[in-house]
Structures are given as C-alpha cells and as structure tokens.
Image (tube, rainbow, N blue to C red):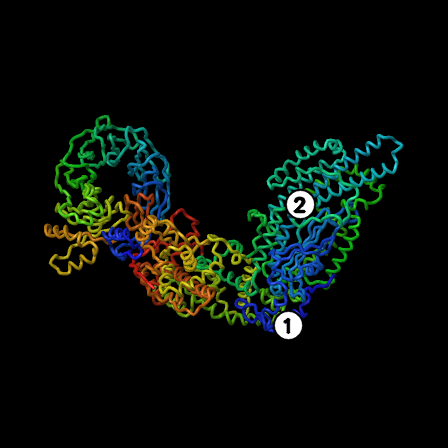
Amino acid sequence: MIGSPDVVAFTKEDEFGQTSPDPWGLPEEFSIPLYPPADSNPWAKTSYAKFTKDFILISEFSEQVGPQPLLTIPDDPKVCGTFDLNYFSLRIMSVDYQASFVGHPPGSGYPRLSFVEDSRVVLGDSKEGAFAYVHHLTLYDLEARGFVRPFCMAYISADERKIMLQFQEMSLRFSQASECLKAGNRRAFAKELQRKLQDLEYTHSVLQREEGLQREAGPQSMYSAHVVEKANELANVEKSIYEHRDLLRQISSYYCYPRRDPHAVTCQRCMTECLSECEALLDKYAKLANPFSYTAKGRKREDGQGESDGEGGEEEVEEDEEGIKRRSSYTPQLIKAKSAKCFDKRLKTLQELCDDTFYEATMELLKETERSFRGDLCYLHTRRLDKALRKKQRVTNFLFEEDLSDDVEDDGGILQPFCAVNHAVENYTLLNPPPIVLGPEPLKLLKPPDSIDPISETSNTLESELGLGDNHLESSPSNQTLETLESSEETKGSFSSDKSGMGPAEKQQSLGNVSDPPDFDLTTDPDQITDLERESSSEDMETTAGEDEGDNGGDQPPLSFLEVASELEANSEDDSERFSVKTCEIQSDLLVPIDSACCMAQEGFLYEASAPEADPLQGHSSCSQSSQTLVVNQEPQSLLPLQDDYFVGSPCTEKTVAGLELPIGHFGDAVSRNSFEDGSDCTMSASTGSDRAASPLGYGGTVTLRHRKKAGQGALRFVRQYPFAMQALWCLLSGRTLVVLGADEGRVRRLVAALALFVPGPGKCGERVQAWLCCPFTLTDLQRWKLIGLQRMASPVGSSMLYSLSRYSRYISILDADQKTLRCPAYQGQLLANLADHRTFIRRGSTYFLHTQSTLCHLAAKAFLFTFTHHLHLPVSSTEGPEVVEGRRRCFLQEQLGLGEEDSQILLYLSHLITQRYLQAATGSSGAAPCFSFKYTTSVLYKI
Amino acid sequence: MLRWILGGREAQGSVEKSSVLCTGEEQPKNWFTELQVLKGHFDIVRFLVQIDDFRCASAGDDGLVLVWNVETGERLQELRGHSQQITAITTLICSDGLMSHTLLITASSDRSLSLWDPDTGNRVQTVSDLQSSVKCLLVLERLCVWLSGGEELCVWNKDFQLQCHRQNHSDTGITALIELPKNCIAAAMDKEIIIYRLTYSTDSSISLAEIRCLSDHQDQIRALINVNDGLFASGSHAGELILWDAIDWNILAYEHILWEESPPSALAEIRLGAPKPSEMSIQHLTTNGKLILAAVGSGLYVYSILTKTVVAYRKVAHDSNVLHTMLVSDSELMSCSEDGSVRMWEIQDLPLPAEPASAGFFGMWTFGRSNKQTGPPSKKVIEVPNIRILELTGDLIGHSGAVQMFVSFKENGLVTCSTDHLLILWKNGERQSHLRSLALFQKLEENGGL
C-alpha cells in the first residue's frame, strides 16, 4: 500500500491518542467534550492542519492516473487552503476495503459484475493534521477496467474525535449518499449497456452482410485469410452481445440481492423504478437478441430502430418524463474491432456515470451532511443535547423553543430514510434498520470476535480478491479487450453452440428478471465469498468500535456514546466495567437532586389526580403542600428537561413513578438505566443532526436559531435603549398585540425582529409576527399577529391606519419607534425585571439570547405546571364552588409562584396557549376560528 | 386620548369624535373578554337567527345562510341556494309529537322563498317566481301557517302551499308583520297599520280579510312589535311611538320623541350638519313586557308601559344610527350601531340633584361632553323628577363596519353581525378558560397522561 496511512481506529496508542486522564468525569448529560489537557491550546490540533474547516472530498482511483481528487464540498478553494488534495486522495484511496471481485467465475463464460458493499474506514494523517472518515464505493462503467470505477467520499476534519464520535451518523449519511449515487449509476449503466447492445447488434448485422457477400463471391475465397478474419470478428461481436446481455441481466438482478450492508437505506420507489426499467430493457433485448432476426431488420436500420422503439414504448414514456431522450435519438454505430487503447480515451466523469437526478440529489445529501457536521464537536454535542432535552417537553416547546423538525419528533431520532430524489417518505423502507446508538453496541453490531487479526484478515481479503480480479481482468471482455479474446476456433465453437443454446439462454434471462439466485452460486465459492464479505463488513464495524470491543462486548451493559468514546481514548487495558460504574456514580451524584425534584412533581401530580376520589379535604391540603414544596424549592426550569414524561390524572402512572424514583431506591442499576436512556436519547438526536441552525433561509422562512441569535443582539440593544422595554416585553408575553409604529422601515423591521424573540408560540415560520405592514389592520389581523410593524404615513391611508390604531387601542400596545414612546397597560411586576434590565451587564447579543432563553424556558415550565395542575382549574370536590377554585388559583400564582397581578397574566396567557395547543392536537385543525382573549385595562403612556 | 399618536388637524377631529361617549378603558362590568371572528360571508351580514341553545344562522346580502355553532365557533352548514340578498329569515318549528325540529325559512330578493333544514343543510322546500320579493315573514305556530309580506300578503301552510294571498296597493309594501290575538295580524305599510283577520272556512281553506286600517302615524312606520298579550307598539320615522291595544286597536299612548327640547349644540352641528329627520327616526323597538326600548336616531329611549312615561334616555348613545337593541334585564340593555360598536347600558338612578357631588359624578362619567348634555337632562330632570339615566357600562369594539344585529346566547356569548362581512362571537373569557381546562383534563384522562 502506498504511504501506509494511519488507520486511526487501529493505531490508538500512537502519537495521536494522547493517553489523557479521563476528561469524561461529568455525566455525559453535562459534559462538554473537553480538549485533551495535554494541549494547552484547544486549537492546537487544528492549528497545524492546512485547512480551515471540515469538508467533504470525493476522489477516484482512476485507472489512468491513479488516485485523484474530484470535488470538494463546499466547493470553495478556500476551504482546503494549502491542503494537498492529491496527496490525501492517494492516501484515502489506498485503503480500500471493499470486497471487490471482478471477472469470469469458473464455469461461466461471461464476465461478472461484482456487487460490492461499501466500506467505511477512519484514517488519519499525522503530518497533515487531517483525519477522515472514508467511504469507499464502486460505480459501474462499461468502459472501465472490470466495469468498475472505485470512488470514495471522505469527510475530512482536523479533529479526530469529531469523526470518531460521529462515526455512526457519518456512516449513515454517507451511506445514503452512496446508495443514491449507486442507484443513479445503475440506471446510467443500464442505459449505457443498452446503447452498447444496439451498437453491437448493428455491427453484427453489418458484418454478417459483408460475410454473406463474400460467401456469394465464391467458394474459392471461402477460406481466405480475409474471410477467416471476418468470421472471427463476427464471432467476437456475437460473443460480446451475449456478454453484454448478461451484464444487463446482472445489473437488473442487483435489486434481488440481499444487502449485507446494515446501512443500506434504499428507496423503495427508486428501486422499483429502476427495476422495472431494467426489466423493460431486458425484455426488449431478449426479443431483439436473435442476431439473425436483426439482420433482416438491420438492412433497413431505420425500420429496426422504429420497431425497437415501438417495443420499448413503455420505457420511452418513462424516459420522456425525465426529459432524457438520448435513447430514442440514438443511432447505432459501427464498432471497430480494434478499440482505442485504454489510456487514449477519456473516462466518464462522475456526473456522467450517474443519472442526473440522482447525482444532484447525492450532492444535496452531501452538502447537507457537511452542513450538519459544521462546528466543533462541543458545539455539535451541545446542540444535540439541547435537542434531546427539548424533545422531552413537547407540550411547551412551541412557546419559545426553536422548532424541532418534524421527522425528529416522529421517529424518535432515526435518521429519516428519506429519498434524495424526493419521493414520498412512505415509500422508504429501511433495508436493515441502522443502529441508532453511536457507541459500539457489541451485542447487536459485532459478530462474535474472530481470532484473526482484522488487518491481516482484510489484507487477505483484499489480496485474494485482487488476485481473482487480476486473473479475470485480462480476459474480461469489453470492447477494448475484444482483440484479446481467445482463438477463432473457440469462438466459432461457442458461436455454433450458441444457436442451440439460445432457448435456455433466453429462459435464463427471463428468470433473471424475477430473481436470480443461481447467479450467486456462479462465483468461485459461494461460501467463501459470502464469508469474506461478511467479514469485511463486520470489520467495518470494528473500525468504529475499536479493536478490543469485541472481547468484552458480550457482557457489557450498553454504554452511552460518550462513555464509549472516552473508553476508546483511554487505554484499552482499562477495565471498562469499573470505568462505567465510576461514570455512573458521578452521574448519579449529579442527577439526584434533579430527579428527586422530578419525583416530587410527579407525586404532586399523582396526588392531585387521585385526591378527589380519596379524600377531598386532605387531598386539597397536601396538594397545595406538595406544589408548594415543588415550587419554592425547585425551579421548574430544572424540572422540565429531565423529566421523562408527565402523567397527570391517569390511573396508570405506576410505571412512570418507578421510572422516576430512580435515585432513591435501587441506585446503580437504575441510574445506569437512566444513563442508558439518556444516552440513547442523546445519540438518537446525534444521528439526526439537522441543518436547521446552519441553513440561512430567507425572510419569512423558518425562523432558525441563527435568526434568533441575531435577534438577541437587537433585543439587547432594545432593552438597554428603552427604559420601558420591560413593559413592552410584558405586553408580548401576556398576549397583548404590540404594534411597532415607525416611518423608517429598517428601524421598524429591526425592532420587530428583536422583539420577535419574546412572542410566545411564534409559529414555525413566525406566523404570529408581521414585520412590516403598510395598510390599516383589522381585528382579524390582531388575532393573527401578536407583533406588528406598522408604517407611519402622512397620507390618507395613514390617517385611516391611525384610525384603526385608535379604534383597536384597547387590544394593542403601541410602541412608537420615532418618538420613542410606548402606550400600554401599566406593568409593575418583578418577573421581567431580570430579563429587561436597563442596566444589564450583558454585552453580547448571543449571551443575552441565552439568558432570554433560560428565562423564557423557566416561564414555560411554570406555565406548564400551572396548566396541568388539576386543582388549580377544577374543583376537587363537588361541594366546591368556582370561587374556591379561583381562590386557589390566585393563591397558587401569588403565593407559591410569587407572581403579582400582571405577572400572573403572563402565566395565564402561556397557559392558555398550552391548553389551546394541547386541545388542538387532539381534534386536529378544526374549522373553528381561533380565540382572542383580551382585558379591559387602562393604558399608560411611557416615555424615555 | 390618542392625541399623542395622531397629531395634526384631522387627528383633533377624530379625538372630538371619539369623545362623544367614552367609557374608560377599564370596564369591570364588561365580561366579554374573548372573541372569535367568524368568517364566511362575502357581503353584508344583516340577519341573525337563533336556532337553538347553541346554534345560530346568519344571512346577508351574499344570499348565503350559514349555520354556526356558537359554543365552538365552527361553521356547521352552508345553505346555498339564493342568488340574491336575503331579505328576511325566520325559524319554523315543526313538532311531530315527540321531537320538535327547527327549520329555517328564508326570503330573498330573487323572489323566492326556501325552507331549510339546518341539521343537514338541505333545502327542503322552495317557492320561486313570486310576484315580488318578500320583506317580512311571520310564523303563526298556533294556526300552523306562516305569512310572507311584501307587495302582497300571502298565507302558506307548512308544506309551502299557498293558502291565500292579498294584493296591496301601496308602493312600499308590507314592512313588518306581527300576530295579534283572535287570529288577527297587524301589518305595517308605509304610514298605516292594517289589521287582517284569518278565518277558516268550512272546507278548511283560509281566507284573509282586512278589518281595520290605523293611520295615526305621520310618517313611515319603521318598527312594529308585540309588547304583551294586550298591547302592541309601533314607531315611525318621525319619532312617534304609539302604544296600541291589541284587541280593539285603540291608541293607548302616544309619545312623540322630539329632541328639539335640547338646543342643537355647536359640536353636533359640526359633526352631522343640520339635524335630519333620521335623528329622531325610530329604527328599532324592543320590549320585555314592562319597558319598551326605542332606538331613536343615534339615541336610546326607555319607555315604561306601566307609567306610560319615559324612564330614561340618552340622546347620543352612539356615534351613528342605532340599528338594533335588546333589553337584557330590567336595568340592562344593549345596542348596536352603524358606528361599528355594541354598547352595554345600565339604567341607574340619578343621584339627587341637590347633592353637591352630582357635578363631580357627571364629570366622572362624561368628562368630554358636559357642555352638550347638561341642557336636556337637567331640563328633563326638572320635568320628570324620577327619571333615571343610562349609564354606559361597556362597549364591544371589533367590527370595522356597521353592526347590523346581534343575538345573545346568555352565558354562551353574543353574536354580532356587520357590514364588514364578519360575525363576531363575544364570550366570557373566564368561562371559556374554565371550559378549556375541563376539556384539557378530560383529554388527559382519555390519553392516559401526556
């Protein structure tokens, strides 16, 4: 192998894997992936990398020039800087573990296509400071040696751990891309074959005609060298036809193969489409196959073409749909007996090798992959944590949190097997559901450990396969190797026998359409080949897991991904058992107070639920007591994210109680279970990295985290600039529509963008916010929008607008951006003092954003508690009147949550939204108009 | 109030306008703290009919009749069929022994009458190609017939079969119909009220006979209502309110509502120009048996049947003509107007005029208009010592056009319809919130947790 790159997974103890003291002491929920302490500078590692940020590289092992880089994603020369792509391509292409096999299997006269599963490998280059996840794949090319073109896609990063820890997700994403590319390639290959077959058949007919002419010329010339040569040529062409036809059959039988690749995610519809297309092609050539019948037609090529078109009508339609008219406009060409030398001809580019739609889709997938892995590990990690935690509070998420994409919510984090070519989601099936847990899960993923060293095993595999491949490559018949075929006698023999063998051949072809199991047996040794391939695939897994995982994998409790990662970093000698226990202990230490809080909340809820039946009086008192403890001692904020589920008012809550009682009773076991759950949660989200935050969308599109962070700066400025910011925020949070009035569009828009942070439940695309309005608004608008930027105009339109302002003044608050005044009900509460502190020390917008987020999250938690506490809304006993409930609610808000009248309104509004949302989820979107609540209160004018 | 946003000349004008009558923004007695906007009509919505406790039908110039669920705000049915605006709508209760079933009768400018089933949305019956469009409908449950009034008066049975009809020779036609005792019917036609009697002949056919023509009104009759079994009332464009005996059709009381007692204030002139007759036109009459509430121009006028005197009034209750009124209780009333608002009033006793606090009281509730109103009330107060005042307790602002009509569903809320093509459902926010909580916990129980 050239250069012998460091295969990272196997070279843990070399200079990269600093044997660092365990940086994973914190429970993984809270641990931020620390840089190894050996490096004082966290960016030291990246500092000597010659590229600035991670990128994806696609390279090819060209049979003409060797490894060469094809393209990078993002396609920007700045990305890779001075990094030597050529050199790196050489490295990554020199470790291809794909079990490729090409050539004639003994006993079959035809060259075989190898259906190669992808291989995944992580490797690093110490000198370049680059590490890469490398995904090898093989595409088919009729003109290539052995019909295969090895490619690889690599995710290159300066951070080794990033790759190691994201391996599973990378693997999934790249597999998707690879599947897509390969699907497109098979289509393109089938089309190419078809063209080739047309050429060959045409050539055949021409040759036959010539031979016939010579035959007529006289018997004396029967055995002349010229005639013999012609006959040989003819035989060669015929052989070639059969071979190509067989290739076509093979490629169409691809779909019938069981996939051994656990990551192979295939789109059912793409598959069926391809399959049907291939079948149609096969049918067509099975009919056209008789060279002699073609001769008759071939005299008039136009006719033949027309007829073939007629036969292939079905495909024509299909192709027309795609706008590809290549075939219908294709004129068969005469194939020269001597084809061009291998090095003379231009090889197809990647794009040409692949159907256009699929190519584009693949590129999209890869771009998305690149986007989703942007940022350092710490960032990725926290984002995923955040997402995992947020997933647990679906009921209140819509209020202030960035919207989680739907697919995440739907399938609990499995990377949505979506088709890149945009077929409907339901068409997809996971051929083998991909493993979710990032860390190695020995029981599931790994075979019982083999005694053979993986490396030698691989090299064995490679050698044997390469050897086989070489043997057959020489004789593999494609057009360039026509002249190297065996002697004319043999060809002739095969040709003559062919006549009689036509029937069975056809039958076999038609069989191949349906399913082609015997094909598999035609390879050298079925057992051997499957074994080899299986081994190679299992070895892929080991690449992730680390070499020692297989040994103690059997009885290990399922570890979460970070633990495993740290374990990988730590020496393999480390007793993993002890290690995990230690982690668990630390984890549990941290988890205890929080979990107990959960339990308290839980008990409170449960009690409320059962109280009415049991003893109303006692129920009431203890209810308030429990909720009091809950509220006073524990901030709901800390309660929320860690509770698994809330169960209120249902009799079947025993289960949850058990789940939440963790820290009190059975210690280690429960906690480890907890950590496992959390871990799986975390990794689930880890495998679903979304590009939401990174994808900048246009105005009016989805409100992304980035937008909101940017808004943080504006909000901070607003808070610092306006002493009545608190009142403005209160208006927004208590559901009173805020109209930002101003003459300058930019200023108004900026203000609106900043204030939009505080609009509860702004909707996925910020539907509740109207950034700029130039016409008078109506009541419906007020109902729809909670924050409106309104243009101040001097025209008649302006006066009518002002009229609407004064008319609806009872429903709105008006922030005058020009005169810097705010007209809204008086607010004297304390709740927002922290949020809208005029003299805040926060200087950075993003800091303020986070501060805001936490405060709002806090609020949402309180609102949740309030909404779902039974006795605050409904009487506990039948003797209680509504006044009692009202009193209790007031008491709860004022004494337990410590909220004043105005602050309570915030909570009531949030609670209203939660209720509405919760009820709507049940009925779906009913035809009923939304409710609009308001209060009749006096407004006050605030000035700077 | 809003001078700070407005500024400039026209702004001042609008400030003046809004100060005609202004409750504070604080309205503790106004419990309508939640609203739902019901969309569906494409033109002015003119009529609202209550079908049962939770349904109401709305009809308007777009020829559509929509059936709404007042509890949820859902649109239940869409009754399409009329090609032109609807001119009258009423309910027809069909009871087949056990079940009573409410149907809707509509009349339209396309000169057709239709019977609808609001449950299914089907058009059960229809009569088209009438000679003229129908302006009013009257159902006589007792006789199992119903009448349609326009240029002709027709009597129909419940199967939409014409029983008899009578041509009228007035240009305006019949504008209002009420039922009187002894199978009599009063029809308002221009300045006259004509009494008809329905008689059943032996072959069970019905005939209609004109018995009496009451022509005491000086101007066109705008409103005609039944007060109680023995009384009915009519109001004219010239502000005459006449109370009639329902049996012998004599005038029991005659009240001419004239505002000329009050010297037209300068401000009012600026606003509306010279006082038009419409200022004293009785737009709408409503009663609860003890009181008659008359919408006179943009004012409200409460007349006691017992004492046959004006109990309370307010000349300028709205910025524009009052279109519909309702007596919620003996002391509470509601009115809606072309100015787009619905106002709620309370009849309150005036403090003793001698009391020194009275000036302050006046100042408190109408700070902007003391110069306008001091004239008439003081005069009235002197004339009728026990007169009371109408105190504005709250208003509902939401429509951007004239509020044509409203229907109250008691605690379920209030439905208003307007020229802005919308209906608004006003509700008690607290009650709704309680109902939502109930639903929430019910759903929680169904789901077995969150």
Q: Are discs 2 and 1 located on one and the same chain?
A: yes
Q: Which mark is residue A632?
A: none
Q: Given the image, on which type of amino acid does mark 2 rest?
A: Ala
- Residue placed under numbered mark 1 in the picture: A19
Can the viewer see residue B177 in this picture? yes
Q: Position of residue B353 (x, y in %)?
A: 12, 57
> Of the residues tagged 2 and 1, which is closer to the observer?
2
User: How many numbered marks are there?
Assistant: 2
**Relative to A21, does residue B209 appear above or below in the rendering?**
above
Q: Horizontal and vertical percent for residue B231?
A: 16, 40
Residue placed under numbered mark 2 in the picture = A188
Could you tell whether B240 is left or right of A350 in the image?
left
Question: What is the distance, in whole Å, between disc 2 and disc 1 at their CAs?
Answer: 49 Å
Q: Nearer the viewer, residue A346 or A290?
A: A346
- Residue nearest the observer in this picture, B144 or A529: A529
Q: Quadrant of residue B422?
A: top left
Q: Amino acid at mark 1?
A: Thr
Kindly identify which chain the residue marked by label 2 belongs to: A
Name the secondary structure under disc 2: helix
Q: Nearer the viewer, residue A900 or A829?
A: A829
x, y percent for residue B420: 32, 44
Q: Residue B37 vs residue A72: left or right? A: left
Q: Quadrant of the N terminus of chain A?
A: bottom right
